[in-house]
Image (tube, coloured by chain):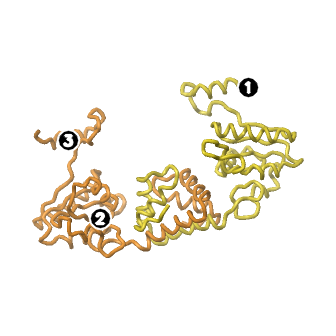
Chain colours: A yellow, B orange
Amino acid sequence: MPQNAEPLENLIDQFSRFPGVGRKGATRMAYEVMGMSNEQAMELAKAIEAAKTRLHRCRLCQDYTSGEVCPICASPKRDRSIICVVEAPQDIKAIERTHEYKGLYHVLHGLISPMDGIGADQLCVKELLARLDDQVKEVIMATSPTVEGEATAMYLAKLIKPLGIKTTRLAYGLPVGSSLEYADETTLYRAMEGRGEL
Amino acid sequence: MPQNAEPLENLIDQFSRFPGVGRKGATRMAYEVMGMSNEQAMELAKAIEAAKTRLHRCRLCQDYTSGEVCPICASPKRDRSIICVVEAPQDIKAIERTHEYKGLYHVLHGLISPMDGIGADQLCVKELLARLDDQVKEVIMATSPTVEGEATAMYLAKLIKPLGIKTTRLAYGLPVGSSLEYADETTLYRAMEGRGEL
């Protein structure tokens, strides 16, 4: 994108690159920056630079970290026999908030999507396969329940199962707190199919 | 706000300062920055710095500009007998989009709000009064139709009317394209009150 010569217009252009931020939202943000103290604005600019220069991918799980290996991969408390495969680093945060999972993670940094021209070679699949030593007993596919998430889970399962490692998928069903009335047919069908004994 | 030592958390903190951006939105934006090329991220950081360092307030209307006087105040094509008073610079953009108004503007950079401890002395009122020479025949109060917008318009009208300058207010009424059914009572009452002959 060519830089806009007008500083305010350029800033609006930059903010409107963010997904979910429209032209109006970007304009509001730009004016918000103008209303900040110089110190606050410089802190924001520095935070962007620092995040990009000080963080890189963990050698093992590919999550962002400032060390060579991320805190989860480095922790002696985590169960090294399970790897949970996710699309993006923010998915790790979501799973960690449940305080249930004690295994390791692996970030693919995307999903297979032929429509967008994204194949397995553009994802961190090689790095995942390299981690599958004798210690690993299970790989959980925790990609989203979308077409791309399914396709990626299937693809990886086909690669991993032959290695004699258990390959599992997150359960489908009704979201907790939701109303049956508003559930779509596919979800309801999957919830029925995956029903458990009481 | 103390800087967060963790670059990613710090960036999320910075983005969540924006109004209308929650923790989730800020997290998405931070990860979006991480997904950008280094070049793109540095462009964003530089755009923030450039907007803050290269722009300042127009000596006359107080809108942001890179010159001493903004393009509207400097234009010989604008009608110097009318000044339209707005709360914020983005309001100028909104009015300019109508392509109807040919006069000048004045930005207050806020509204009188006793609840938030904002009095007239914190707004650019002095700068407005200083502009009211013999050339000025009308001042349009284009503050929002909110309690604060009304109070500010009233306050300014009391100061400006004694100078023998016509003081007007934007019309109240039904928004174009809206349905009468969904109009609130106050708007409908004002629309009735301000009815015009056909």
Query: What label sits on residue B191 in the rendered view?
Result: 3
Specify the subunit that label 3 lies on: B
The alpha-carbon separation of the residues under discs 2 and 1 comes to: 64 Å
Q: Which kind of residue does numbered mark 3 sit on?
A: Ala
The CA span between labels 2 and 3 is 27 Å
Marks 2 and 1 close (CB-CB < 8 Å): no
- SS state under label 1: loop
Characterize the local packing of mark 2: few (<14), some (14-19) or many (20 or more) Cα atoms within 10 angstroms: many
Tag 2: amino acid: Leu
- Left/right placement of residue B168 relative to residue B181 reads left
Q: Position of residue B83 (x, y in %)?
A: 20, 63
The residue at 16%/44% (across/down) is B194
Query: In this view of the protein, which residue sits in the foreground, B21 or B157?
Result: B21
Q: Which residue is mark 2?
A: B108
Are marks 2 and 1 in one subunit? no
What chain letter is assigned to the residue under label 2? Answer: B
Q: Which residue ends up furthest to the right in the rendered image?
A: A134
Is residue A44 among the parts visible in the rendering?
no
Instruction: Find the residue positioned furthest to the bottom.
Output: B68
Total numbered labels placed on residues in the image: 3
| SS at circle 3 | helix
Place residue A142 in its image quadrant. top right
Q: Compared to A186, does B178 lie above or below? A: below
Which residue position holds label 1?
Answer: A196
Label 1 resides on the chain identified as A
| Location of residue A75 in the rendering, given as x and y in whole percent from the top left corner | 79, 56
Residues at marks 1 and 3 on the same chain: no
Kindly check if marks 1 and 3 are in contact, taking CB atoms under 8 A apart as contact.
Answer: no
Q: Quadrant of the C terminus of chain B?
A: top left
Residue A60 sits above or below residue B56 on the image? above
In this image, A87 relative to B15: left or right? right
As drawn, A179 above or below B45 = above
